[in-house]
Amino acid sequence: MRRVSISALIVSIVASCAVFAQDEPASVVHAEILPLATQSLLLDIFAMEEGGFVAVGERGHVVLSPDGIEWQQAESVPTRSTLTTVTGSGGRLWAAGHDSIIITSRDGGMTWTRQYFDPERRQPIMDLHFFDEQRGMAIGAYGLALLTDDGGRNWEDGVVNEEEWHNNALTMIDEVLLVAAEAGMSYRSPDNGNNWEPIEMPYPGSMFGAIADSDQCFVVFGLRGNVQESCDLGENWDELDSGTESSIMGGIHQDGLSIMVGKSGLILLRDSNGEFQVSSHSSGVDFSSVAHMGARRFILVGEDGIHHWPEVDMELSP
């Protein structure tokens, strides 16, 4: 199988989106059902509220699992655009990606319908968040921000930053929203997204991910192992020593533990005492996202699809 580097994908994401938009007709084209979809490039994974997992990636691939071990491809996905992000609220799912595509599912991810598609924008969506079943926000390249208040039936343009930097990741604490961006910039909204203010971060490079931990702290991470933290809702920031110079692409916080993943098999654990533990997956692939299976067992997605940590016999029940 040919590997597609996640870092190379990020560098070329806008160009690849433009090429795909030229090849793709405006009518709905469904993702192909392929036997090795679970081993293809997957870019995001989401633990569903009702149990089970959904992961998304290249060529419109959506794969599903009730337990994180056995996987199957979704039956009907109305796009072959690369999907970069997936989320859910109130039993519904949404996924988004290249060509500004947004799709939704009401049956646990088995079948999907298209809600938004505008390939001529040439602005891939990088992250998607629903605050409840009706209110959602998508962010992406060149300052892209899309808002909905009707469950995604209609989307309107919003403004996070006037500079049109790439908006890479979105997280929130209470009503304070944080967008991690590029060129040393992040953006904060103290009022649930109505108004935004720029934040010049300590590190001048790009941040690819953002999480909120159980101590009510924002943590953003990205290029060359840089991790930055704010425990006053984004007012002040500290640089943390992550112990790695590998780029960090994705992460979650669960049960007092933060786990971040990235290039060349990087796995970065941070427990409640704030210390980092650097590990490496034996596959050596680039990881882009992670989900918690329970009992400190995790599903990792990226190059070559689905992986697990710790690396134990996955035939055992979770």
Image (spheres, rainbow, N blue to C red):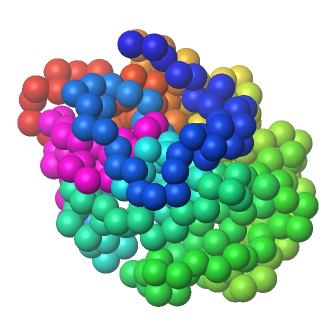
Q: Is residue 51 magenta?
A: yes
Where, quadrant-wise, is the N terminus in this rendering?
top left
Task: State which quadrant residue 13 falls in.
Answer: top right
Residue 163 location (% of width, % of height): 90, 61
Residue drawn 17% across and 27% down? 314
Where, quadrant-wise, is the C terminus in this rendering?
top left
Q: Closest to the observer: 46 or 252?
A: 46
Residue 87 location (% of width, % of height): 42, 61
**Residue 15 visible in image:** yes
Q: Is residue 262 above or below residue 21?
A: above
Q: Closest to the observer: 147 or 183?
A: 147
Q: Is residue 116 above or below residue 125?
A: below
Q: Is residue 266 above or below residue 116?
A: above
Residue drawn 30% across and 31% down? 37
Q: Closest to the observer: 128 or 1?
A: 1
Q: Is residue 287 above or below residue 139?
A: above
Residues shaded magenta: 50-77
Residue drawn 29% across and 21% down? 311
**Residue 231 visible in image:** no
Residue 25 location (% of width, % of height): 52, 51
